[in-house]
Image: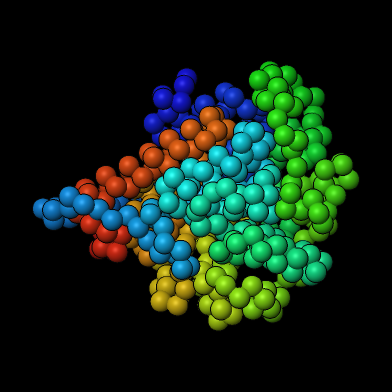
């Protein structure tokens, strides 16, 4: 199977599975507990039908949107995800370059594997910095200051991860950073020697957003311990309000799900919220972002930008979310599988396919711009 044989999300996933050692593939592919929320994220879209309008004449279609003050050429963006250079040696560079080519937003994780300054310098696309709230308040301020100096446009605080989710696939393989693999996990690496050769012949794996503050590279701190020991489970609305004031620019909360929390986010001055259950990787059994979208848009959509992520695999999924009132839709695994499969050409191809599907869908819906999509286009079964 080659990159040219990949025509959808599932094709990229299969190619990634062929190329990655099992523990790393399952880190991307897995979720929490029984993975029921992970499955429901995509199934939620299938319970909703599009109702097209015909004979509208839509030869030219404008896919552009403005989100948190950033003008995007497409209504989808690359959500921040961790550890990208584990999947392909180009990591965030590949994803940022593809996002820039499509004129859309790119998210850099505090658990990213390329420095945010380097990404800001080399890729001309709006950049979001996603970070976690640490017990060390000085560290939180230092990370925000660093992002500001680098020229990051939007700050994004993840609020659904005050402790790590129960990812049982990782426990079975022993996946962690640094690696502490089980015998079965080691065998999986032995079966994919090309990945190992690539890993050791390129730049050393590191976490540059955290290296200056936390010793994670020498084996003293694992990702699991980072979540349980470094992050602050007492984080509250007053803490976040102070950070919003300190940042002084567009500030977004990722992982909000309830109407009450979305209202609080608007009250403290956030520019946006991302409805998200972390791809089903945190609280299994939680509601899908798509199912919760209309409720939150109705409550706060006139005050702040509401986005969503989770389970998005098709252009039709994007159209459904936009019709419910989302300002833009985040992609995660959708670009991680092609990154693992083929680096930047893979991500480019995946984003091309998504853009083509959204554009084709808009024409078939009889809509000339994203603003023409609305709930009259939808019916729920």
Q: Position of residue 112 (x, y in %)?
A: 67, 48
Residue pushed farthest left?
55
Q: Residue at x 72, y 34 (%)?
A: 203
Q: Residue at x 62, y 33 (%)?
A: 88
Left or right? Give the position of 365 relative to 305: left
Q: Is residue 210 above or below residue 237?
A: above
Left or right? Give the position of 132 relative to 304: right
Q: Residue at x 75, y 65 (%)?
A: 142
Residue pushed farthest front?
121
Question: How many labels were placed on the picture?
Answer: 0
Left or right? Give the position of 201 relative to 364: right
Q: How is the image coloured?
A: rainbow
Decide if residue 158 is in sight here.
no
Front residue (pair 269, 310): 269
Decide if residue 270 is in sight here.
yes
Q: Name the quadrant containing residue 187.
A: top right
Front residue (pair 326, 136): 136
Q: Position of residue 313 (x, y in %)?
A: 43, 43
Residue pushed farthest bottom?
267
Front residue (pair 170, 35): 170
Question: Quadrant location of the C terminus?
Answer: bottom left
Q: Is residue 347 above or below residue 57?
A: above
Q: Position of residue 91 (x, y in %)?
A: 61, 39
Q: Residue at x 67, y 45 (%)?
A: 114
Q: Name the quadrant containing residue 244.
A: bottom right
Q: Position of residue 146 (x, y in %)?
A: 70, 62
């Amino acid at each position: 199977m080659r990159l040219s044989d990949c025509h959808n999300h599932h094709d990229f996933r299969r190619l990634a599975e062929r190329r990655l050692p099992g523990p790393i593939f399952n880190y991307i592919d897995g979720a929490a507990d029984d993975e029921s929320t992970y499955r429901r994220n995509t199934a939620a879209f299938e319970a909703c039908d599009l109702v097209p309008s015909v004979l509208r004449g839509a030869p030219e279609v404008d896919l552009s949107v403005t989100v948190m003050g950033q003008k995007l050429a497409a209504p989808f963006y690359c959500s921040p995800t961790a550890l990208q250079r584990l999947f392909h040696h180009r990591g965030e560079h590949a994803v940022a370059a593809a996002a820039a080519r499509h004129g859309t937003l790119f998210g850099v994780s505090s658990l990213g594997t390329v420095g945010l300054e380097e990404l800001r310098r080399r890729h001309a696309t709006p950049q979001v910095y996603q970070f976690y709230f640490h017990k060390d308040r000085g560290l939180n301020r230092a990370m925000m200051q660093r992002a500001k100096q680098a020229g990051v446009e939007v700050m994004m605080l993840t609020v659904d991860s005050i402790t790590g989710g129960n990812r049982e696939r990782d426990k079975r393989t022993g996946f962690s950073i640094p690696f502490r693999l089980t015998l079965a996990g080691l065998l999986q690496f032995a079966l994919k020697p090309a990945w190992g050769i690539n890993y050791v012949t390129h730049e050393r794996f590191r976490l540059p957003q955290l290296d200056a503050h936390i010793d994670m590279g020498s084996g003293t701190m694992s990702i699991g311990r980072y979540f349980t020991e470094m992050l602050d489970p007492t984080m509250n609305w007053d803490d976040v309000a102070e950070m919003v004031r300190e940042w002084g620019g567009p500030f977004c909360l990722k992982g909000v799900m309830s109407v009450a929390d979305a209202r609080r986010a608007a009250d403290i001055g956030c520019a946006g919220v991302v409805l998200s259950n972390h791809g089903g990787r945190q609280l299994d059994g939680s509601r899908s972002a798509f199912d919760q979208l209309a409720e939150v848009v109705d409550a706060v959509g006139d005050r702040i930008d509401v986005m969503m992520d989770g389970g998005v695999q098709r252009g039709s999924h994007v159209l459904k979310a936009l019709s419910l009132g989302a300002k833009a839709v985040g992609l995660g695994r959708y670009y991680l599988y092609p990154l693992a499969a083929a680096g930047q050409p893979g991500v480019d191809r995946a984003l091309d396919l998504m853009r083509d599907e959204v554009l084709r869908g808009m024409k078939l819906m009889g809509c000339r711009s994203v603003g023409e999509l609305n709930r009259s286009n939808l019916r729920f079964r």
